[in-house]
Image (spheres, rainbow, N blue to C red):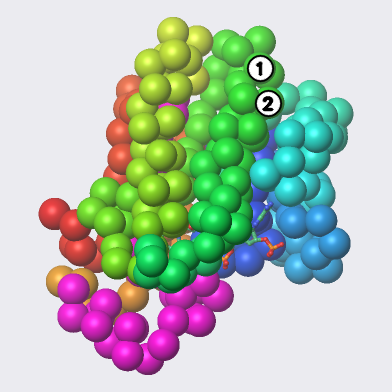
Amino acid sequence: MKLLERVALVTGASRGIGKACALALARSGADLALNYYPGLQAEAEGVVAEIEALGRRAIAVEGDVSSAESVEKMVAETLAWQGKIDVLVNNAGITRDGLLIRMSEKDWDEVLSVNLKGVFLVTKAVAKAMVRQRRGRIVNVSSVVGLCGNAGQSNYSASKAGVIGFTKSIALELGGRDILVNAVAPGFIASEMTEKLSQEVKEAVLKTIPLGRFGQPEEVAEVVAFLAETSYLTGQVIPVDGGMHT
Ligand code: NAP
């Protein structure tokens, strides 16, 4: 229970990897602010109930991570709730896959806006509070494709590579205030995001994974929870990919 009395904010926390991270942090003792995309409150309230059943406090906070106004509101609501944010997990993300020559500007902009600008906006808003607290842990959810690229995902891979550069830069800026900033780079994890891939693509991907299976959200979450508790590790990217990228 290393995170007892700590407050964590997880973006995109109502399902998939975000939900698993929230539950893992709660099991380590943290109270949770669960961000959900505007209008999709019911699923987030379900996660609130699961966390309360673990004996921890939780609230659902609405917010579109790609909107500065929405992010300011979400962070202010979280700070008003418990007065601090000790842990931030930037998890919210989307895909709009397609080969470059067919990719629309809209698909490029949407992915960069949520996956990269979203991380910037939420981190900036939360870092102000962490600097005042002189302590914080930030974990960004990148992707293995941010390290090695992926045909059909130039927008997504660029956004996730951007998150890695952002993570390393912010780690340098904030280290002196005991604010540690790291990233995880998940491989192919069973979630709604990967469920929509064709059977053909799934089979091709499986062949590239030495462990021979997709990962589970909980397997990413245990690394995120470790990074939320760590004290001498910053600016690093931890692949959680069954050995895909070595
Ligand atoms: P998912 O099931 O599709 O969940 C994505 C989450 O992001 C949802 O909770 C969604 O909210 C939220 N979200 C999307 N746009 C948002 C916005 N503008 N503002 C706030 N929340 C927003 O995907 P997942 O697989 O759990 O992915 C979670 C993270 O892991 C993403 O960053 C993804 O890129 C990364 N990742 C996933 C894999 C994988 O194989 N699954 C691999 C590497 C990295 P709603 O539920 O409200 O729509």
Residue farthest bottom in this picture: 199
116 to 178, vertically: above or below: below
Quadrant in the rendering for residue 123: top right
Q: Residue at x 47, y 15 (%)?
A: 174
Q: Is residue 220 left or right of residue 129?
A: left
Residue named by callout 2 = 125
Judging from the image, what secondary structure is the residue with disc 2 in?
Answer: helix
Region in magenta: 180-208
Is residue 23 at least partly visible in the picture? no
Q: Is residue 46 magenta-colored?
A: no
Residue 128's tag is 1
Quadrant in the rendering for residue 198: bottom left
**Amino acid at the residue labelled 2:** Ala
Q: Which is nearer the eye, 155 or 195?
A: 155
Q: Residue at x 37, y 91 (%)?
A: 199
Q: Is residue 187 magenta-colored?
A: yes
